[in-house]
Amino acid sequence: MLSSVLKAKINGREYDSLLAKLYGTDESTVEKQRARYIAAIEKFEEKYGEEREIAICSAPGRTEICGNHTDHNCGVIVAAAISEDTLCIASPNGENVVNITSEGYGDIPSVNLEKLRATVSDEGTTKGLVKGICAYIIKQGGECKGVDLYITSDVLQGSGLSSSASFENAVAATINGLFNNGRFSAVELAQISQKAENEYFAKPCGVMDQTVSAVGGTVCLDLEDSANPKVTNLPLDLDAFGLALCTVDSRASHDNLTEEYAGITKEMADICQIFWKDSLRRLDLETLVNHISFLRDMVGDRAILRGMHFYMECKRVEDLCKAINAGDREMFLKKITESGHSSYEYLQNAYVASDIRRQPMSVALSLAQSFLQDKGGAWRLQGGGFAGSIQCFVPKELVQQFTEYMEIVLGEGCCKTVTLRSTGAVKVMG
């Protein structure tokens, strides 16, 4: 659809019902998104020219609810897509390059579709992610042609809400829609995005973030067969529980923490290697416990504690699914809080061990606990950990009071109420 026509339709409120589905039914929310979409199209026009045939794709961020760092050992996770998302405005350019402009970051080096081999210079770069997505779509029999992209996101980078997976899925869904007639499923797009992040960006992430963003809704993700994740929808209704989901930004960045994340994966893998297993999912807890004395000298105590977290966390996911399906609010909150304590005490990803004087995540967690522990709420860190945000389930009538309490220490704007989203990565318009 021509950019001018699409702007007129948005201004004419023809897409209001769709925007309400993605972001919430409140009129002010719809109005805000209407303005956001118009502004993004105009930025595209400024960069690439007016009267272009464009399409807009959206991919949500995600919030992990339980299952912290179980995905890289074929574990289980409960997670949900959120209303914050990445928008990708796209138009084929008839060339053999992918041009990228990202709001706040400017022009990204173009991707030459004839040169898609991974290089060291791609590592840690946006170009590397886009290049990897194009390469893996082609490797799996898809097609990728030249396209101009303008990308904007309101998923706060480094917040633990997976801005990277949202970005990756927005790009992958765009290429899937424009050039492949939607042939790749949501799970396949997630796997393509994960491979791009692993091989081109050089971050050893699991597939949880990308899958939840691609699929949408609240899901239980079982990765026993990581090549074919089992996705089960869950009827989580926070309104029925009388709860609001608040994220609290610890004001610490995820930058330069790849080694900390990789350390969790490596230490769990060290245990597996001793028993000739490819993941902790293939090793039973009893075997680990029976060999702890031996393992302490081989892999160290922290690795054992991280392994113990994996088993307990997977069991918590099972219990949490039962609580959600049964509408059991108290059990839901109990398992969320247990997950938070396990990540802090066993997984130990609340702070960077090499810099113990700075523990912003720990401070945020202690504040949340002091406010919520006797008020019917729950708190935990989320995502990779070490930095970013914590997750809190707050009784709806206490959200304002909770926000003011957290902002006294962490600063204005640290606390944000997040809405869950039922739709995953999708072509929205055009």
Image (cartoon, grey):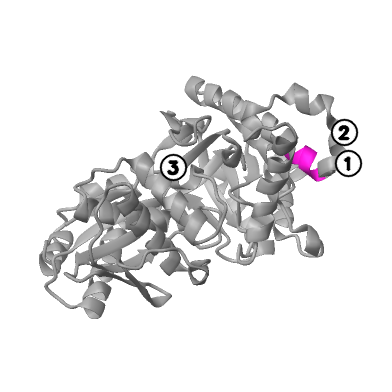
The quadrant holding residue 167 is: bottom left
Q: Residue at x 48, y 22 (%)?
A: 325
Q: Dot 2: within a 10 Å radius of its alpha carbon, few (fewer than 14), some, or many (20 or more) residues?
A: few
Q: Quadrant of the N terminus?
A: bottom left
* Horizontal side, residue 191 vs residue 75: left or right: left
Foreground: disc 3 or disc 2:
2
The residue tagged 1 is: 297
Secondary-structure class at tag 1: helix
Residue 168 percent location from the top left of the image:
40, 56
Residue 45: which disc? none
Foreground: disc 1 or disc 3:
1
The residue tagged 3 is: 212
332 and 85: which is toward the camera: 85
Residue 52 vertical position relative to residue 132 in the rendered view, above or below? below
Sequence-first disc among 1 and 3: 3
* Horizontal side, residue 350 vs residue 5: left or right: right
Residue 420 percent location from the top left of the image:
42, 43
Q: Amino acid at mark 1?
A: Asp
Q: Quadrant of the C terminus?
A: bottom left
The residue tagged 2 is: 294
State which region is magenta: 302-306
Q: Residue at x 65, y 57 (%)?
A: 406
